[in-house]
Image (cartoon, rainbow, N blue to C red):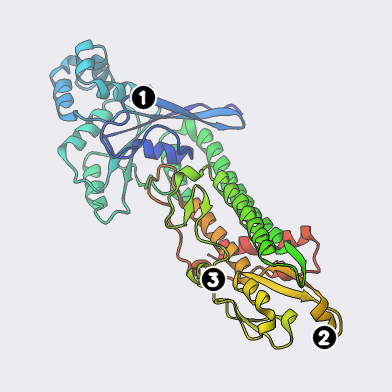
C-alpha cells in the first residue's frame, strides 16, 4: 500500500470544538486539552492515522483565531502587488517577524494551512454569524487550500444552522457538513471524509483505504462487544453453589453474588476498552458507574424494579409443593423454607435437588443459581452500555447517557441461554447471533 499522505488542518475561532473534533476522529479521549475556557490550545499539534502500520494521514489541531478583523486589515494594507495572489500575501505575513509576534496564533494557523492539503474550519453553530467569522474564512481562503466547514453543536436548541449555511454560501463556501464533535456517529464521520475526498482526486485512494479500515473496526467492535455480553451470560448462568440443607446460607449467597459481580465487572471493562474508554471518563449517573463499577446492587430487588423487571412470584420446588416466593420481598408462603425465600428475594433461585420421595426433599441439598430476572438485568444493562459507547464521542465530558430502558426491556433472554442441550460453544454462538439481531432490528 502506497497512497499519498493527507495532511488535514483543523482550524477555527477559539473554543469552537477543534480539539474535540480531533479527539472524536482519532477515537482518543486523551488527545490535547478540552476546556470551556478560551485559548486552551496554544500551539499546533498533530496525530497520524494508521492503516496496516502505515500513516496515511495526519490531523493537526491548532490555536484559535482570535484577531481576524485586525489581521484582515493588515493583509489588505500590505497586499501590494500580490492582491490577487492569496498564498503570497499570507507568506508576506509569515515573513514579517513583527506581524507574527502581533498575530501569534493566527500566524501559526496560516502556516499550518499553507502546509496542509485540506482545512476543516470548525464553527460553533450556536453563535450568530458575526463579521469576525466572515473575516476568518476570507483570510483562510487566501491560503489557496480546499476548505470544509464543520458546523459543530447543531443538535443544540440554540443552533443557527440555517443562518450559517446561508452566510457560508455568500462567502462561496459550499462544502459544509453538520458534525457534532461530542457524538460518535460513524455515518456522519464517513460523510465528512467523503466531503474531503471530493475536493482532491489525488487523495481518493487514501480516504477510501481509511474509510475501509473504520468500517471494519466498527463491525469488529460490535461483534466483540456482543460476544463479551454473550460470554458473560453463559458464565453467570453456569455459576452454582451447592450446600447441605442445614448449612448456613449467608456465606454461600455472598460468595455467589460476589462471583457474579466480579464477572460482570470483567464484561464492563472489556466493553470500555473496546471503545477506548476508561473508568475515569464516567460519573455515577446515568449508568450508575463509579470508577467503572455498577453502584446499584445487582441483587437488590429495587435494582430489578428500576430496570422495569417484574420479579413476580416463583414456585420453589425445594421448599415443598405449592410454596411460592415473592421475589420482590423475599416473602415465603411456608415457614419451613425461610432461607430459600430469602435466597430468592436476593436474586437467587434456591432449588432443592431431591429424589422421588418427599423424605428425600427434606434430606436433600440446596443448589443456588442465578435466576432469570437477574440474567435479564445483566443482559439489558450491558446492552445499554454497548449502545451508549457506540454513540459516545471521545471529547464528551458530560456523564454517559443511557438509551431509554424500554429499548431493551422488551427483549427476553436469548433463547439459546435456556437450551441446556447445546454445548457451550454452540450456545454462545447462538446467543451472540440473537444479541446481534437486536442491534439490527433496532
Proximity of marks 3 and 2: CB atoms separated by less than 8 Å: no
Residue 220 visible in rendering: yes
Percent position (x, y) of residue 121? 32, 36
Measured Cα–Cα span from mark 1 to mark 3: 53 Å
How far apart marks 3 and 2 lie (CA) works out to 31 Å
Element class at badge 3 = helix
Q: Picture coordinates of residue 165 (x, y %)?
A: 26, 47
Q: CA distance from mark 1 to mark 2?
A: 79 Å
* Tag 1–tag 2 contact (CB < 8 Å): no
The residue at which mark 1 appears reads as 44
Query: In the image, 321: left or right of 280?
Result: right
Give the mark nearest the N terminus, 1 or 2: 1
The secondary structure type at the circle numbered 2 is helix
Residue 172 found in image quarter: top left
Q: Earlier in the sequence, mark 1 or mark 3?
A: 1
Task: Indicate which label's residue lies in the foreground, 1 or 3.
Answer: 3
Q: Which residue is mark 3?
A: 301
Quadrant (top left, top right, bottom left, bottom right) of the N terminus:
top right
Residue under the point 84% across and 80% down: 360
Residue depicted at x 32% and y 45%: 152
Give the camera-side residue of 44 and 291: 291
The disc at residue 358 is 2
Nearer the camera: disc 3 or disc 2: 2
Q: Secondary structure at mark 1?
A: loop
In the picture as drawn, the residue positioned furthest to the right comes out as: 356
> Taking the image as drawn, is residue 416 in sight?
no
Q: In the picture shown, does residue 398 fall above or below 203?
A: below
Residue 359 figure quarter: bottom right
Q: Is residue 62 above or below residue 126?
A: above
In front of the other: 39 or 318: 318
Q: Position of residue 390 (x, y in %)?
A: 50, 51
Q: Earlier in the sequence, mark 3 or mark 2?
A: 3
Amino acid at each position: 500500500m502506497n497512497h499519498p499522505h493527507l495532511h488535514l488542518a483543523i482550524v477555527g475561532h477559539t473554543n469552537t470544538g477543534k480539539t474535540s473534533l480531533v479527539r472524536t476522529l482519532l477515537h482518543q479521549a486523551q488527545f490535547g486539552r478540552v476546556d470551556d475556557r478560551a485559548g486552551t490550545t496554544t500551539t499546533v499539534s498533530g496525530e497520524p492515522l494508521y492503516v496496516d502500520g502505515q500513516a496515511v494521514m495526519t490531523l493537526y489541531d491548532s490555536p484559535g483565531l482570535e484577531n481576524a478583523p485586525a489581521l484582515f486589515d493588515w493583509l489588505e494594507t500590505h497586499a501590494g502587488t500580490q492582491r490577487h495572489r492569496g498564498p503570497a500575501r499570507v507568506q508576506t505575513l509569515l515573513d514579517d517577524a513583527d506581524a507574527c509576534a502581533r498575530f501569534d496564533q493566527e500566524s501559526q494557523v496560516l502556516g499550518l494551512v499553507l502546509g496542509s492539503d485540506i482545512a476543516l474550519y470548525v464553527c460553533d453553530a450556536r453563535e450568530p454569524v458575526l463579521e469576525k467569522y466572515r473575516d476568518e474564512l476570507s483570510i483562510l481562503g487566501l491560503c489557496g487550500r480546499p476548505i470544509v466547514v464543520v458546523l459543530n453543536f447543531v443538535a443544540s436548541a440554540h443552533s443557527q444552522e440555517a443562518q450559517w449555511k446561508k452566510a457560508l454560501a455568500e462567502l462561496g463556501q459550499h462544502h459544509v457538513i453538520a458534525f457534532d464533535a461530542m457524538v460518535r456517529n460513524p455515518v456522519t464521520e464517513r460523510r465528512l471524509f467523503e466531503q474531503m475526498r471530493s475536493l482532491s482526486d489525488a487523495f481518493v485512494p487514501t480516504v477510501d483505504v481509511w474509510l475501509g479500515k473504520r468500517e471494519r473496526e466498527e463491525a469488529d467492535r460490535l461483534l466483540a462487544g456482543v460476544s463479551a455480553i454473550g460470554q458473560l451470560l453463559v458464565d453467570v448462568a453456569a455459576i452454582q453453589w451447592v450446600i447441605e440443607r442445614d448449612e448456613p446460607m449467608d456465606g454461600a449467597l455472598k460468595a455467589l453474588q460476589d462471583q457474579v459481580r466480579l464477572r460482570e465487572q470483567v464484561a464492563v471493562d472489556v466493553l470500555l476498552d473496546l471503545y477506548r474508554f476508561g473508568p475515569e471518563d464516567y460519573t455515577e449517573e446515568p449508568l450508575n458507574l463509579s470508577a467503572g463499577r455498577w453502584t446499584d446492587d445487582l441483587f437488590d430487588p429495587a435494582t430489578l424494579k428500576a430496570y422495569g423487571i417484574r420479579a413476580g412470584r416463583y414456585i420453589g420446588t425445594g421448599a415443598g409443593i405449592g410454596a411460592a416466593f415473592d421475589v420482590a420481598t423475599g416473602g415465603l408462603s411456608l415457614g419451613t423454607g425461610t432461607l430459600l425465600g430469602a435466597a430468592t428475594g436476593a436474586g437467587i433461585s434456591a432449588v432443592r435437588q431431591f429424589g422421588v420421595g418427599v423424605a428425600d426433599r427434606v434430606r436433600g441439598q440446596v443448589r443456588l443459581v442465578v435466576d432469570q430476572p437477574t440474567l435479564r438485568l445483566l443482559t439489558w444493562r450491558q446492552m445499554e452500555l454497548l449502545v451508549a459507547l457506540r454513540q459516545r464521542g471521545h471529547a464528551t465530558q458530560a456523564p454517559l447517557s443511557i438509551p431509554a430502558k424500554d429499548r431493551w426491556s422488551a427483549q427476553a433472554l436469548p433463547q439459546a441461554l435456556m437450551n441446556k442441550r447445546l454445548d457451550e460453544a454452540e450456545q454462545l454462538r447462538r446467543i451472540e447471533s440473537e444479541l446481534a439481531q437486536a442491534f439490527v432490528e433496532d
